[in-house]
Image (spheres, rainbow, N blue to C red):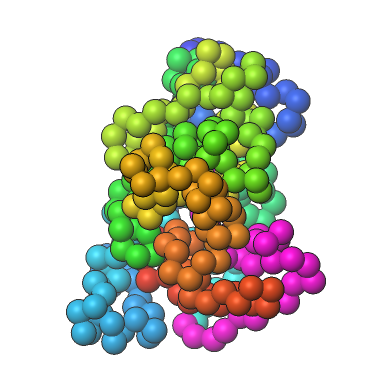
Amino acid sequence: MPSDQATQQSQLRSSDSATGFDIRNTRAPLEIDPSVLTNRSFGESPMWQHAVASGRLPPVADRLPKHPRVIIPFKKIGRYGGKIRRAITGDIVQVPATMKAKDEGLLTFSHPMGDSIEPNLAERWEFRNGGRELYVYIREGIRWSDGYPFTTDDVLFYYNDLLMDDDGRPLDRNVTPSAFLVDGKPVKLEKIDDLTLKFSAPKPMGRILYGIANHDLFTLPLHIYGKWHPRHSTDGDYEEFRRRATRAQFLYTEGNPTLAAWRPVKWVHGQRVVYERNPYYWKV
């Protein structure tokens, strides 16, 4: 191991000693090489075959990113079709994770043990400057479920205009995660380009990867929510933005674009939420 990398990892370990979580790998772990995938590798869901044939939807190979995330099944590849019905004994607004339809994060935890951090929306990352800078690289070609391109603007919008904005933060997200604070001050997030993000702080960010992976909702579609935020629209209103940007409104409102495997198509308040397949889901 090069001496500078060893020093960097030592700094990260010491700054994260309280968490007990191992984030010593400063680069993303290996995945299946996407270059081995061809158009023949992708199967079109029967649900979307007619839409593709009629020209209302691009072929599946054109809907996927350049490097889709390849999922290794626990036992075997599943079959198309079927329905999933789940019952919840509490308020659906309070337990969105139990619906298995929440949004996707930039990074995620390994399955089934969750003892390491893996790429997700981001395909790789790297620390620089002794852990004081973190560069995160988003997969090229990911789209929201409405077909609109997903870019770093959607991450900055969430981070700067919701999470770190006292005026824009909804009541159900009223605590800034400590992983994004260094000496009590927020970690800075900048856009390098449409696919590259830079996190930075005066000291090594030992908990930042954990915070990103643990934060399932780290994106907000600027092309939808921007019209309600005063920083992005002259017609914006903080009260209206906060109302629409709650977890429940974002996850369950009919027609809301998502990056998850299912998109909401019906929400009967207090009774049920109905989802259908996301035609632009970016995993295979």
Work out whether residue 202 can be spotted.
yes
**Residue 219 appears in view:** no
Q: Which residues are magenta?
A: 80-107
Q: Is residue 97 magenta?
A: yes
Instruction: Confirm whether the magenta stretch covers residue 164.
Output: no
Q: Residue at x 71, y 59 (%)?
A: 94
**Placement of 52 over or under 100, stated as above or below:** below
Residue furthest out toward the left: 55
Q: Above or below — where is 234 with respect to 134?
A: below
Q: Residue 34: x percent and y percent? A: 34, 54
Q: Quadrant of residue 194?
A: top left
- Which of these two is toward me, 267 or 185? 267
Residue 264: % across, % down: 50, 71
Residue 40: x and y in percent read 28, 72
Name the residue rendered at 74%, 72% in the picture.
88
Q: In the displayed structure, does residue 284 sit left or right of residue 85? A: left
Foreground: 4 or 203? 203
Residue 169 shown left or right of residue 13 in the figure: left
Residue at the spot x=68%, y=78% of the render? 271
Query: As rendered, which of 114 and 254 lies closer to the eye?
Result: 254
Q: Quadrant of residue 126?
A: top left
Q: Quadrant of the C terminus?
A: bottom left
Q: Write the residue at 38% across / 55% down.
A: 224
**How many tags in the picture?**
0
Most common SS among magenta residues? loop
